[in-house]
Amino acid sequence: MRTVLLPGSFNPFTKGHADIVERALALFDRVVVAVGYNENKADLSGIDERLETIRRIYANEARVEVLSYSCLTVDVARQVDASAVLRGVRSFKDYEYEMQMADVNRQLTGLETVILFARPEYASISSSVVRELQHYGHDVTDFLP
Ligand code: ADP
């Protein structure tokens, strides 16, 4: 049984994230979506709602698990027995960051990172843009699964 860990903040979980999960299900037996947070109050608020929203999306998909964590990615990967970390890349900017993180994680524990490139139609969706639109009362349903 091959498990892959998809760590992120998912604030909110977008169609781009959902696409990465769906494509990963063709490659792995189990996908663990891990919602990372810092233990300060600002970050804690809304974490339960975020978890619940993602769990509802995958209510009928037993191969997707959703949990929260506030430790190192390599530690949560070990806890869920993940063979690899999964990340999505939309641009060169993402690429540089992911390359560095993948390198650190591999050096720390040997944990490998699998990258899936964003579908062009989702490549400009980011949680921060969705948050900004929401803040100004814009309808964001097109961006959310
Ligand atoms: P983080 O704060 O760790 O970057 P995010 O929730 O923003 O967490 O993203 C989690 C992962 O999903 C990252 O690898 C990010 O590059 C990827 N991702 C974000 N948006 C998209 C998208 N539209 N298409 C594909 N991958 C995406």
Image (cartoon, helix red, strand yellow):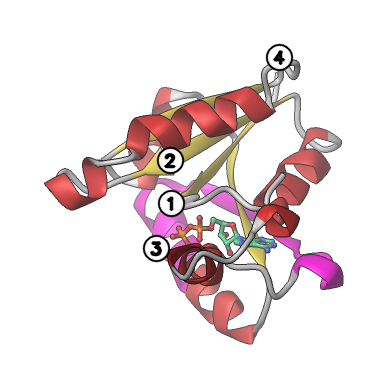
For marks 3 and 4, give the CA distance.
31 Å
User: What's the amino acid at mark 1?
Assistant: Ser
Say if mark 2 contacts mark 1, CB within 8 Å: yes
Look at the numbered disc 4 and give the secondary structure of its residue: loop
- Asked if the magenta segment contains residue 102, the reply would be yes
Ligand 1: image quarter: bottom right
Callout 4, which amino acid?
Answer: Ala
* Disc 1 within 8 angstroms of ligand 1 (CB): yes
On the image, numbered disc 1 is attached to which residue?
Answer: 9
Find out whether residue 139 is within the magenta segment: no
Q: Which residue is mark 4?
A: 62
Dot 4 or dot 1, earlier in sequence: 1
Q: Residue at x 46, y 52 (%)?
A: 11
* CB-based contact (under 8 Å), mark 3 and mark 2: no
Closer to the chain start, of discs 3 and 2, is 2
Q: Is residue 88 above or below residue 93?
A: above
Name the residue tied to disc 3: 104
Q: CA distance from mark 4 to mark 1?
A: 22 Å
Is tag 3's residue or tag 4's residue first in the polypeptide sequence?
4
C-beta proximity under 8 Å, tags 3 and 4: no
The disc labelled 3 sits on which kind of residue? Val
Answer yes or no: do the residues labelled 4 and 2 have beta carbons within 8 Å?
A: no
Q: For residue 115, what is the image quadrant?
A: bottom right
**Residue 108's x, y, as percent?**
35, 52
Which residue is farthest left?
40
Extent of the magenta region:
100-122
Q: Is residue 73 left or right of residue 130?
A: left
Query: Callout 2: helix, strand or loop?
Result: strand
Earlier in the chain: of badge 4 and badge 2, it is: 2
